[in-house]
Amino acid sequence: MLLLPALAALGLTTQCQSSKPTATAAATAPVTASVATPKEYRYTTAPNDPLGVRVYKLANGLTVYLSDYKNAPRIQTYIAVRAGSKNDPATATGLAHYLEHMVFKGTSRLGTKDWAQEKPQLDKIEALYEQYRGERNDPVARKRTYHQIDSISGVAARYAVPNEYDKLMGSIGSKGSNAHTSNEETVYQEDIPSNQLEKWSAVQAERFKEMVPRLFHTELEAVYEEKNRGLDSDFNKEFEALNAALFPTHPYGTQTTIGTIEHLQNPSITEIKKYFTQYYVPGNVA
């Protein structure tokens, strides 16, 4: 079974190399039910499950759900993080959703022309956003700081490779590259050819290794647009009002996935990094 060793790359260190032992003397020797041979993955199943899902727990804590699909030589992949808008800090709502956008922007090796030149600019932008957040009551200072953010963002953008992740996925024949954030989860999905699993795994391992706030300034525009669509949606208004009434003291009702206008206008890269470090870990991902 190729899937397990490939997925072991997702952060993601394991001693196993295959889901089945190789035909060696050691592998074919009798073993007790309580002891796994070196190259064996154990799994659990649910009784009477029509999909026959196997649930694997890797050594690093990552959970893998595997269900065979024989109608086409493709694999529908989902990487689910057990954290969503419910986990946003009350002072930085919309953070989980904005992080979802950032995960598509690459890493120190993916999506950059020159990381050594780009990183100092990104560090400056992060510091300036923290400064900007602290200047809410000083319009003159905020305008000056925003001008600096805009200027340095332009410099940083010179080193970015836009859409490199999407191009990589396209090059292996992936379809349906997408993600969503809800109260409880953030999920990233791809539909890949089954013979491209190793390449997909390598890219995902790199992608979830670190979060780089690349093109942060311009990506805010996309999030603003989502917020504006929500403000114009009657369904969205009703849904938020219902949650506020049902959960008046719970994050379900006190904050939304997109976040408040106030928080969107005062984003914190520092808080986003903290969120990524806390929740985007193998034991919290499946």
Image (cartoon, rainbow, N blue to C red):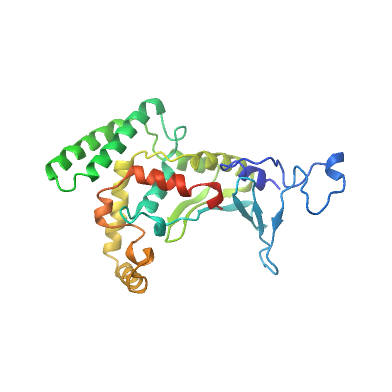
- Vertically, is 223 above or below 170? below
Tally the marks. Answer: 0
Residue 115 in sight from this viewpoint: yes
203 or 85: nearer the eye? 85
Q: Which residue is outermost to the left?
A: 140
Residue 184: quadrant of the picture: bottom left
Residue 90 drawn at (x, y percent)? 33, 56
Residue 154 drawn at (x, y percent)? 27, 33
> Which residue sits at x=26%, y=48%?
266
Residue 212 drawn at (x, y percent)? 40, 38
Looking at the image, residue 73 sits to the left or right of residue 162; the answer is: right
272 or 180: nearer the eye? 272
> Which residue sits at x=58%, y=40%?
199
Residue 94: quadrant of the picture: bottom left
Looking at the image, residue 274 sits to the left or right of residue 192; the answer is: left
> Which residue sits at x=34%, y=43%?
269
Residue 114 in sight from this viewpoint: no
278 or 121: nearer the eye? 278
Residue 150 drawn at (x, y percent)? 23, 37
